Structure formats: structure tokens, C-alpha cells
Image (cartoon, rainbow, N blue to C red):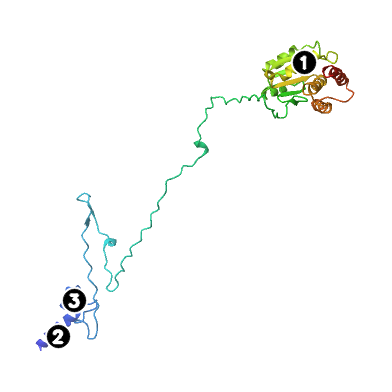
Amino acid sequence: MSRRMLLFALLTTAGLSGCNSCQKAGYTAQKPPCASCGPPGTTARLAPMPLPPRPPRVVEGAEPSTFVPATPAEETIPPPPGKEEPPAVPQETPPSVQLGTPIPRRTESARLPTDASKDPPVSVPKAPDVNEERETPPPIDVPGYVLARPNVGTGLKPFPDGISWLRDQGYKTILHLRTPGEDNAAARRQFEKKGLKYLSIEVSPATLTKAVYEQFVRDVIATGNHPLYVYDQNGAMVSSLWYLYFRVKMDLEDDKALAEVKRIGLKNDDDDDHKKAWLAAQTLLGTLKP
């Protein structure tokens, strides 16, 4: 009898406390028993034992007493069986770009700097060739200006700016047809101040003679005076002397000579000075060209 009770006590103790394996694994009666301890037909679920902490990792190059604990991110968890990661596909290297030699770009700043201390070059008007006819631009402040002959202009008295214009056009000499006894000192100074040579002939309808005409021709044809500008006060004596020059020196027909002097400034109206000068030229023409 005592023997049966002893066996019953042992079985009861094993059912409450678990088998030897469960006791070693740290299980108690409150936790699910193993297959040997549980009732028949049940499957025991054992909780895994917690892993011991990993030893701290030593950082290279740090002090011997400095340690860095391992982090869970550094642990490598192997993939489950049958789910290996596919092999990495090698990335293609993009083709390299070959750049050519850069071409320098010309800009305004690339120009050589100019020396602001130097004065700009002064343009000197070129003297016209005395052997060819010149095309003169429109005059400035030279009333009645026309070309009577190549390199010989004629008209009325120029204003101060007109004198500068004549000089800039290359004129060298001024021939002034003035009335007898007229003071020409101021006119001479005015032209010579601009660097022009000043000549004058005293003439009027009453003093128009062969000697006066011949002096006029000499001054006009002298190439040393070219370019030459001939003027008088109102154009009366200028047009009359040019008429004699065209009729006698150039031997033009009367109608052609008359057309030339009209272009120069001969007036056919009742102007007293022009009428007297024209009659004096007609009278002298009978002597010069019988």
C-alpha cells in the first residue's frame, strides 16, 4: 500500500513541476508543458531562451579603454532558405564626353586700350591736283560759289566760316576784284590769317582796259595760284571779266560764253552795276577780238 502511494506522489510531483528537461529549460507549471509532461495528443510550444549579449566591439585607432557597443543594425541576418537575394546586376559606365579645345571669344574688352593722354590724329586736307577737275561739295557761307574753270572757283565775298571752308577744301589763293581806291587791308588780314594768299585787281566799268583784262588772265591761268577763288562785291565785274575770258582766251561762241557767265552770276535785269559792267565788256571785246 505504501508503495502505491509513493508512486502516486512521484507522478503528482512530476505533473506539477514538469519533467527534468522542462525544469532545466526554466519552465514552470504555469507555462505550457513539453510533450512528455503534457496530456496525450498535445504539442508543446517552447519559448526560445534569450541570447546572451554580444561582447562590445573595439574601435581601431581609439584609446585602449574606449569601446563601442555593438548595435543591432550591424548584425547580419542570413536570408531564409529558398529566398536568396538575386545577384547584383553590374551598372554600365556612362560614356565619357570629350571636350574640344575652347575657342577664345572676341569681346569689346579684348581690344587694345587707347592712350587717352594722346591727342587724336588731325586730318590734313589733301590739296587737289591742279591738272584735273575737282568735285567740290556744297559750300558753307560762300555766296554764289561756282566752278568757273577746273581748280578755279568764283562768287561773292565769303563770310568768315566761308574762308575756313575754302581753306579746308584746299584753296591756296584769293583774287579780289575791288573798286579803285577801296581799302583792302582788312580783307587781306582776314584771308592771310587763315593761311591763304591774297591778290587783288582794281577794276570798275570805267577802268576796264586791256591791261586789266590781261592781268586777270595771268592770275587765273597761273597754276601756282591754284586752287584759286575769284570774287567781287556784287558779281558785276566778275561776270564781265569771265565773259571776256571765254570769248577771247577760250574762243567760245557768243551764246556759249553768255551761257557760262549767266551760270556764274551775270544778271540781265536793269541792275545798274551789271548793266554798266556788261556794256564795258562789250566795248573792250571789240578791241581784243576785232
What is the x, y in percent for residue 22?
A: 18, 76
Residue 138 pos. (x, y %):
72, 29
Q: Is the residue 140 above or below the residue 46 in the image? A: above
Tell whether 129 sits left or right of 207: left
**Is residue 202 in sight in this rendering?**
no
Residue 76 left/right relative to 259:
left
- Residue 25 appears in which quarter of the rendering? bottom left
As rendered, which of 246 and 84 lies closer to the eye?
A: 246
Judge by depth and name the residue closer to the eye, 3 or 239.
Answer: 239
Q: What kind of residue is marked 1?
A: Glu
Q: Residue at x 77, y 20 (%)?
A: 231
Looking at the figure, which quarter contains the N terminus? bottom left
Indicate the secondary structure of the residue bearing disc 2: helix
Q: If you read the primary sequence from the N terminus, does the residue marked by circle 2 or circle 1 appear first? A: 2
Which image quarter: residue 41? bottom left
Q: Secondary structure at mark 1?
A: helix
Secondary-structure class at tag 3: helix
Residue that carries the numbered disc 1 in the rendered image: 214
Relative image position of residue 68 (x, y in whole percent): 24, 55
Residue under the image location 81 percent in, 14 percent down: 210
Above or below residue 231? Residue 30 is: below
Question: In the rendered view, would you say 131 is above or below 186?
Answer: below
Judging depth in this view, the residue of 198 and 221 nearest the camera is 221
Mark sitting earlier along the chain (2/3): 2
As shown in the figure, which amino acid type bears the numbered disc 2?
A: Phe
- Mark 3 touches mark 1? (CB < 8 Å): no
- The residue that mark 3 highlights is 22
- Residue 8 shows which numbered tag? 2
